[in-house]
Amino acid sequence: VQLQASGGGQVQAGGSLRLSCTASGVIFRIATVAWHRQAPGKQRALVASITAGGLTNYADSVKGRFTLYRENGKNSIYLHMNSLDVEDTAVYYCNLVITYPKRVDVWGQGTLVTVSS
């Protein structure tokens, strides 16, 4: 199982970016997939997740600014990030979890998002 993350970069505060995460080697449609982020000096934290059924969950800090959706036909999730703030600067990691019939828990390589003021 592999996850390929892309879309990071540098943007000014108030700008937008879209992150993509594509999986291979797994039955994607049954997975819960999420983005986490780790800012310098801080612990990795959940940004947003989406279940196999399409239910989404967002960290309070990104609600109303970030939107996560999935395209099972492309084995991918996309995180649209709007109104970016310097506090959103972090390495963003994609995570895929399947709990049944066999547990799978895989992380992508991370993509850096830098927001400048």
Image (spheres, rainbow, N blue to C red):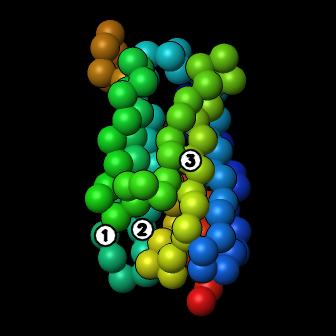
Rendering coords of residue 85 (x, y %):
51, 76
For numbered disc 1, what is the local secondary structure? Answer: loop
The quarter of the image holding the C terminus is bottom right
Name the outermost residue toward the bottom. 117
| Residue bearing mark 1 | 43
Which amino acid lies under the numbered mark 2 shown in the image of this protein?
A: Gln
Kindly indicate whether the residue at mark 2 contacts the one at mark 1 (C-beta within 8 angstroms): yes
Q: Quadrant of residue 51?
A: top left
For numbered disc 3, what is the local secondary structure? Answer: strand
* Residue at the spot 65% in from the left edge and 70% down from the top edge: 15
Rendering coords of residue 40 (x, y %):
43, 81
Rendering coords of residue 17 (x, y %):
66, 60
| Residue bearing mark 2 | 38
* Residue at the spot 60% in from the left edge and 41% down from the top edge: 78
Depth check, mark 2 against mark 3: the one in front is: 3
Crowdedness of circle 2 by 10 Å Cα count: few (<14), some, many (20+)? some
Crowdedness of circle 1 by 10 Å Cα count: few (<14), some, many (20+)? few
